[in-house]
Amino acid sequence: MDFALSAEQQQIRDMVSEFVDEEIVPVADEIDHEDEFPQDLVDEMADLGLMGMPFPEEYGGAGLDYHSYAIGLEEISRGSGGLGTVVAAHTSLAGNMLYEFGDDAQLEEFLTPLAAGDDVGAFALSEAGAGSDVPAMETTAEKDGDEYVINGGKLWISNGSVSDTVTVFAKTDPDAGNKGISSFIVRPEEDDGFIVENTEEKLGDKGCPTAELRFDDLRIPENRLLGAEGDGFVQALKTLNGGRITIAARSIGIARAAFEEARDYAGEREQFGQPIGEFQSIKHKLADMDTKIQAARMLMHKAADKKIRGENFIKDAAQAKLYASEISREVANEGIQIHGGYGYTKDFPAERFYRDAKLNEIYEGTSEVLRNTIGDQVLDN
């Protein structure tokens, strides 16, 4: 097993890191304060190929492997947790749904502008009464001639209010449980009946709008169905499984930001005549923070490696996401503690890292659900 980055992966990391340091970090506090979608930064990331990293060049992507994609997303998230979510929801969820399950015409028409970053994507699965319990969804899609008519609503949809393409899940057979769920391509600007009801005021993840959507007799042509009727539930699970690797990357990026800020502060802040980093208690905190980050990154790349090889990576992705998300919060918490009273103020970014980190334990599989997933995989062996 080779733990060294390839020349291409090193180049990707250096390029994205430089972009983050020069363009994102200086405005990260402003993004957090204003909570506006940073279209200018998204456009710059598109120019650098960062909005379609894992997709083939023939569809407008950068043609990178999943290791490189995770490396890039880790760096973006180090600069801004909200931008990390923008890219992950756009690429791992919306884009990957199209890439994995779209036909040739759908790939050409809808994936290409997403991969190039000309369009922004969203993934509309969750509902108020159907978060972890996906089959409890109430959104329906009824066939009417050569169209589908969608009615219902979705909640907590990242990029939902700014998206150009949304993959929407709805029941085509309400009596068939999870086998009655299908997925569709929706174009908000083209399709009448797509309504943004609200955007959430969140603890963190600022800059990525999280929307409540409503579909009111929304009509779409039948060629917007992804795969076959009834495939939606399995499609969602497969897509979320890959997405968990990138939420691990987001978690690691935020943890790195919290660790590096705390490390630098510990070297500058003096008490009792010496930098606080010289005290054993602070030194031990920093040691534990760094160790957790390194372990989380290993789990993330193990899952990415299995995905690339075409092996079963359900347990690996769940473990990577579970561990990385929890240590992200732990590292951010210790970062506040090292800053002392300053860590509890907005004068330092330590508190922002904590707020951004918490989300990782909730979306794309809560820690509780992931433990069930891991346990099921362990018992099946």
Image: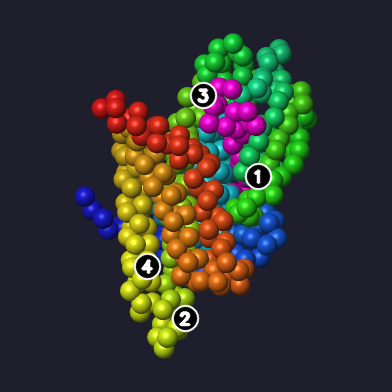
Residue 233 badge: 3
Mark 1 belongs to which amino acid?
Thr
- Quadrant into which the C terminus falls: top left
The answer to whether 298 is drawn above or below residue 313 in the figure is below
Q: Position of residue 202 (x, y in %)?
A: 65, 50
Q: Which amino acid does the dot numbered 4 rest on? A: Leu
Dot 4 crowding, Cα within 10 Å, few <14, some 14–19, many 20+: many
Tell me where residue 319 appears, x and y as whole percent: 36, 42
Contact check, label 4 and label 2, Cβ < 8 Å: no
Position above or below: 175 against 127: above
Q: Who comes first in sequence, dot 4 or dot 3?
A: 3
- Residue under pointer 2: 269
Place residue 188 in its image quadrant.
top right
The residue at which mark 1 appears reads as 210
Q: Amino acid at mark 2?
A: Arg
Q: Is residue 17 visible?
A: no
